Image: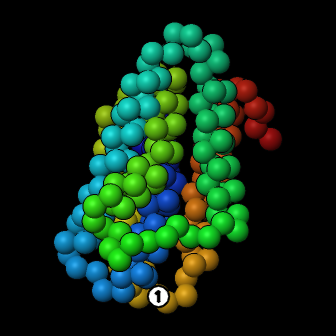
Amino acid sequence: MGIISVLLIAVALAMDAFAVALAAGMGLCRVSRRQVFRLAWHFGFFQGAMTVLGWGAGLGIHAYVERFGTPLAAGLLVLVGGRMIHEALSDHPEQARSQDPTRGKTLVILAVATSIDAFAVGLSFAVLAEPVWLPALLIGVVAILFTIAGLRLGCLLSNTANLGRRAEIIGGLVLIAIAGRLLIQQGYLPFW
């Protein structure tokens, strides 16, 4: 998988972190450097770590799914992308936030919740027999950058609940497009 594809995956995965950081920034209004560091570090670390954990889990099943690796990886990307789009379009109320979502249990829960998709992507890397360390690093760094941007932008904007949803929809569409490209490159789908 090329660096452009990995960067696109990283951006797509970072959309959840961006949306949560945007909401946190809007809720906090003023964000200290310490808050920015805590949220960005945790989101970036968990995104990268979950990618590696998914890859490790995928290594165990690689021999069993080698023949179906590309369709399985594409299917996981479509599943993750579709889930992101579904959640963005659903009318569920936003998660209740504590006074400071950059601290304590809330911070860990948000970090895990925004990085579940990275586990599935790591699993896809293993199924495709792709190396994981550079992609995991890029995914973590991009998540850090998007988290910082989301916090800062959230402080500047007052009525952007739809911006977070749009970011998740775009992220989901990017993952689905990458899955389609993967299937086309491997000859599973014809290119028109």
How many dots with numbers? 1
Where 41 sits versus 22, above or below?
above
The answer to which image quadrant residue 146 occupies is: bottom left
Where 146 sits versus 61, above or below?
below
Q: Provide residue 14's location: percent of width, then percent of height.
A: 45, 57
Which residue of the protein is positioned furthest toward the left in this rendering?
34
Residue situated in front as seen by the camera: 173 or 37: 37
Q: What residue is shown with label 1?
A: 157
Where 186 sits versus 151, above or below?
above
Judging from the image, the colouring scheme is rainbow
Q: Amino acid at mark 1?
A: Leu
Which residue of the protein is positioned furthest toward the top in this rendering?
63
Label 1 sits on a secondary structure element that is loop
Relative placement, left or right, of 85 versus 53 is: right
Residue situated in front as seen by the camera: 159 or 149: 159
- Quarter of the image for the C terminus: give it: top right
